[in-house]
């Protein structure tokens, strides 16, 4: 459950989705099935097929698969 909560947060950051923080963990604690269904639907709407796995989706959707967003760290 804890792992899926962090994945939801990553999904939000990657696609600039509204929400996040404590709300994501709360949704997974109260109803993990609902939270996972929302994530599945979001990926399907973006052209991914979660049932075939990440690597197969990257090969299938070369133009759709995005690299993780790199956040700038501390600077000099």
Image (cartoon, rainbow, N blue to C red):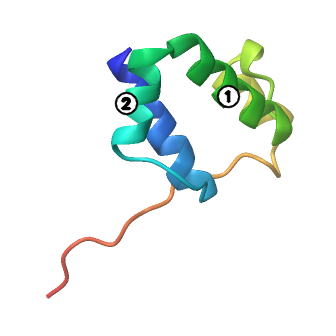
Determine crowd level at label 1: few under 14, some 14-19, many 20+ residues with C-alpha closer than 10 A: few
Q: Closer to the camera, 75 or 26? A: 26
Classify 63 as above or below 27.
below
Q: CB atoms at circles 1 and 2 under 8 Å apart?
A: no
* Residue in front for this viewpoint, 3 or 38: 38
Q: Is residue 56 above or below residue 33?
A: below
Q: Position of residue 74 (x, y in %)?
A: 18, 76
Residue 30 visible: yes
Q: Which mark is residue 38?
A: 1
* Side of 58 relative to 2 (left or right): right
Q: Is residue 13 above or below residue 75?
A: above
Residue beneath the point at 80% across and 24% down: 49
Q: CA distance from mark 1 to mark 2?
A: 14 Å
Frontmost residue, 17 versus 11 = 17
| Whether residue 37 is situated above or below residue 42 in the rendered picture | above
Q: Quadrant of residue 39?
A: top right
């Amino acid at each position: 459950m804890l792992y899926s909560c962090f994945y939801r947060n990553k999904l939000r950051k990657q696609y600039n989705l509204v929400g996040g923080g404590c709300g994501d963990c709360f949704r997974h604690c109260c109803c993990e099935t609902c939270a996972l269904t929302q994530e599945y639907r979001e990926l399907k709407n973006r052209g991914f097929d979660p049932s075939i796995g990440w690597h197969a989706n990257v090969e299938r959707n070369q133009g759709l698969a995005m690299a993780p967003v790199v956040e700038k760290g501390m600077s000099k």
